[in-house]
Amino acid sequence: MAGNLEDPIIPESGGEDEIESVDATDKGKKSSNVKVLQSGKKRQRRLSSSVWTNYDFLDEPDKDGNLVCKCKRCGITYNANSKNGTGNLIRHVKNCKMRTFRDVGQMLLSKSTSSLELRMPKFDADEFRELLAAAIVRHDLPFQFVEYDGIKKCFSYLHPDFKSVTRNTIKADILKMYKRDKEKMRVELGEVSGKISLTSDCWTSITTDGYISLTAHYVDKYWCLQKRIINFCFMAPPHTGVHLSDHVFSLLKEWGIQKKIFSLTLDNASSNDVFAENLRGELDLVCGGDFFHVRCCAHILNLIVQDGLKEIDDAVVKVRETVKYCKGSQARKQRFLSCVKHVELQSGKGLKQDVPTRWNSTFLMLESALYYRKALIHFQKVDANYVHCPSIDEWSRVEKIFRFLKVFYEVTLAFSGTKYPTANLYFPNVLKIRLLLKKELESSDRFMQRMATKMWEKFAKYWSEFNTFMAVAVILDPRFKLQFVEWSFKKIYGEGNDFEEEMNKFRERFYRLYKVYEVVFAAKGKSNATSGHAQFESNSLASDEFMTVSLFLLFFYC
């Protein structure tokens, strides 16, 4: 007798169309649930092959007296005598034109002929479980998802061979996946030839549990900018600078990158100064760590504008009350939309309400109010209870404040980019803000002057001196080079001694950073020469040190 089918058919559910799978090891075993073949001599014989579940025996023999069976699907008859074997019956089951499938997705293209064939793909339970675990992580599903009755039925419908798993099993699968990917990440970070910059922040959950995140930024061997969240873990109290530095240093040692760190970007929390200073002493840093601590530019911008908005104008208050009034009831919303239609404006933009803790929401509120200015003026005519509409002079002040905040909004968007480098954007944008604040400090508008004074105090606290490392990024940008730094310093300090002093200070730090990379590159070049390599290999040519020195030579001396 022939063994099991290599490609079992999955018939439509229910009834006697179900095909029983018989394991090869069970061929010799007798089963209580088997058919009995009645021959003409009334000798009974048990049928052990699973192929018989696809056939029915006919009561009448053929003209030669042989036992006959009929396919349950197409009705074709075959000789069922045991001496003829079951090979022809198995072949027919595989190629039967009337066999049915649950889904057209089970019909696959043949690799050889590219034609559509009725065959089942090989089901890999391990691969399916891995895909399921990845989906649970990606879509933030609970582990109990795999135990839902509806999900079990769906999986069973797609493939009856799938064995359902428990939430504990899927949790174990996810932990295995995490450990495997973490090891891959450790290898990848170990292969980084240049330096790694870090960003870190702390966060408190709604249950008052503290967490800390650590993100690595680096350039891989293909010169692609990469960003990886390498840790997001529980941070036990106290959240002091000493405790934070110890915890982060232990994380860096775990990843094996404590000797590759270049800089750490943090917000302006008071504990972060102690945190950065303590961690600086633990690491082997470029130039003694002069470029290690970088303050988050977007956070500084937020602090600057928040201080300025404390000197809020009455016109802005009227705009805020206008938005509240228009959104106060459904009837007011309808009247406002009628006014929008009357002045032929698009209603899709909508009025936006600001949030006290987010200054950019105030900017967006003013932007939407200015767009619907004509509609609001008309709304005042049709609604006698609307008394917060700004006057013509107040609309002018709102427009002036909007233009002023727009600069900060655009700079914040530029600093917050994730798909492109932002270091080269620091110097020109901070210069733009500096010059804007200086201009408004001398403004004849008393409100704008008071607002700029508040913002300048915060600006001077954090950006009184430019970050040298960020200025280096501008020099390496072929659109700016060193001439832009010189021009900027002249705009800030004038042509006198202050300009010369600041430029000399900048050049000193700049050359110091260059010398560090020059020494590193020279050491690597000597190592390659002594090992017999006259030419650098492609990965050496693409190393961070080589390209950095090349860019210094190209952009600094041109």
Image (cartoon, rainbow, N blue to C red):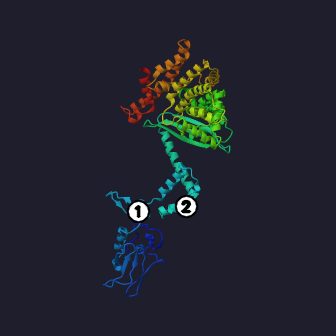
Mark 1 highlights which residue?
120
Q: Position of residue 426 (x, y in %)?
A: 53, 27
Mark 2 highlights which residue?
150
Task: Decide if residue 252 is in sight here.
Answer: no
Q: Position of residue 159 (x, y in %)?
A: 47, 62
Amino acid type indicated by mark 2? Gly
**Gap between marks 1 and 2 measured at Cα:** 24 Å
How crowded pointer 1 is (Cα within 10 Å; few <14, some 14-19, many 20+) is rated as: some
Residue 180, placed above or below residue 62: above
- Residue that appears at 52% across and 63% down: 153
- Please identify the residue farthest to the top as the structure is shown: 496
Task: Decide if residue 384 is in sight here.
Answer: yes
Callout 2: SS? helix
- Residue that appears at 41% across and 62% down: 120
N-terminal of the pair, mark 1 or mark 2, is 1
Q: Nearer the viewer, residue 220 or 287?
A: 220
Task: Please give the label number shown on residue 179.
Answer: none
Q: Nearer the viewer, residue 100 or 227?
A: 100
Amino acid type indicated by mark 1? Met
Q: Position of residue 338 (x, y in %)?
A: 57, 39
- The answer to the question of whether label 1 and label 2 lie on touching residues, with beta carbons closer than 8 A, is no
Count all numbered tags in the image, as a single digit: 2
How crowded pointer 2 is (Cα within 10 Å; few <14, some 14-19, many 20+) is rated as: few
Q: Nearer the viewer, residue 546 or 480?
A: 480
Q: Is residue 71 left or right of residue 496?
A: left
What is the quadrant of residue 551 in the picture? top left
Callout 1: SS? loop
In this rendering, which labeled residue sits more in front, label 1 or label 2? 2
- Please identify the residue farthest to the bottom as the structure is shown: 41
